[in-house]
Amino acid sequence: MESEIIRFTDHIRNAISTSLNPTFFEFVTAMAFYYFASEGVDCAVVEVGMGGRLDATNVLTPEVSVITNISLDHSEFLGESISDITFEKAGIIKADTPLVTAASHPEALAVLEQAAQGLSSKLHLYRRDFSGSLVSMDDRRIVFDYSGAGLSPSHTPDRAEYRNLSLPLGGKHQMHNASLAIRACEILSRRGFNIETDSIRNGLLNPDCQGRLERISSNPAVFIDSAHNPEAARSLADSIKDIFPSKKVVLVAGIMKDKDIKGILAPLIRIADSVVLTKPDSERAASPRELKKRVEEIGGRGHAPRSISIANTTAEAMEHAKKICQNGSIILVTGSFYTTGEVKELYGNKSGTLLSLREKYKMGNRT
């Protein structure tokens, strides 16, 4: 696959005008579209990079649009309020194209409902039109039931019921995400795509979701999760409490300085016995001392970790975390894709080809 990526890279570089200076994300989006066209894919799942309205991916006319949830993230680009951010995300809604969402904030729902109505886009809302119900969960797998009314495949009853669906991912929020995917598949089936119910069940068995409550070591237990906004941090903290209610947590955190640092740290500090603050190799990363200041502000209002340490690199942070990790405790690494990526490399996982290409061709970093 690496040779294919290099071939696609060269093709796009030769195709673009010398006067253009695309960001890394814009470049790889063009690569992806070229790949889809070359391979003749029947259906492509394309994820927005940031926002939606002005995103590089938003040149497509989709069969269905999905907005998972909405929180304050990328505020410096998308706006300072939930309404502003939702307006940007609602830009992916197209005329007469269904919208599936798990958005729950009243301001977000108001914006989405108005946008969908204006474009004659049918809104499919999680918990109202379809839902997931947890059966069991651990750090490696969740089992859940799915129920949805009015849009089951044409060869099944009008109300779809999937029992004991197995998903090899940790965290209750993954059940919500999987339910959105199932609803999207039901819509696609009604729009002429041949998607069997067994394909949905089997598809959930093989997701590739690296960096999301991913166990990368067992002695001690080390988990990485790239939560980099308050909503993701809250979901992560809830998942850790649900899965490991009696275990002590050593938190290793490295966060970009343009993020809501306090909002990210607040829910994580409340589940941490010890905290190690670090800085991945990125100019955007906040200094460990800045992170410590935020932790101390949070601790002054409630739960304070037993210890707070500073490490200049992720390698130093992991060495210290292992030293202070007691028997039966877990190490949780989070705050940024940069942080989790570096730690994953420490455990023998090489960085992706696309990251290497970014350095080779010196493309912009912002997404």
Image (tube, helix red, strand yellow):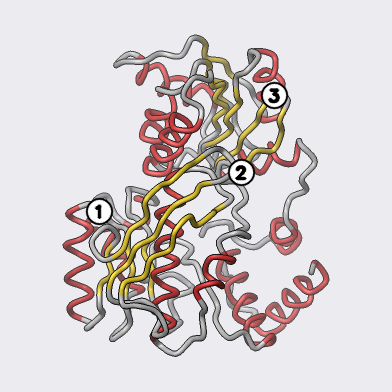
The residue at the point 64 percent across, 76 percent down is 31
**To which quarter of the image does residue 114 belong?**
bottom left
Q: Which mark is residue 220?
A: 3
Which image quadrant: the N terminus? bottom right
**To which quarter of the image does residue 334 belong?**
top right
Q: How many marks?
A: 3
Of helix, strand and loop, which one carries label 3?
loop
Q: Is residue 271 left or right of residue 350?
A: left
Q: Amino acid at mark 3?
A: Pro
The residue at the point 56 percent across, 41 percent down is 213
Of helix, strand and loop, which one carries label 2?
helix
Mark 1 neighbour density, 10 Å: few (under 14) some (14–19) many (20 or more): some
Q: Which residue is mark 1?
A: 104
Q: Which mark is residue 320?
A: none
Mark 3 neighbour density, 10 Å: few (under 14) some (14–19) many (20 or more): some
Q: Is residue 97 left or right of residue 338?
A: left
Q: Please report whichever mark, 3 or 1, sits nearer to the chain's N-terminal start.
A: 1
Q: Is residue 113 above or below residue 244?
A: below
**To which quarter of the image does residue 119 belong?**
bottom left
Q: Amino acid at mark 2?
A: Tyr
Q: Which residue is mark 2?
A: 338
The reply to whether callout 1 and callout 2 are in contact (CB within 8 Å) is no
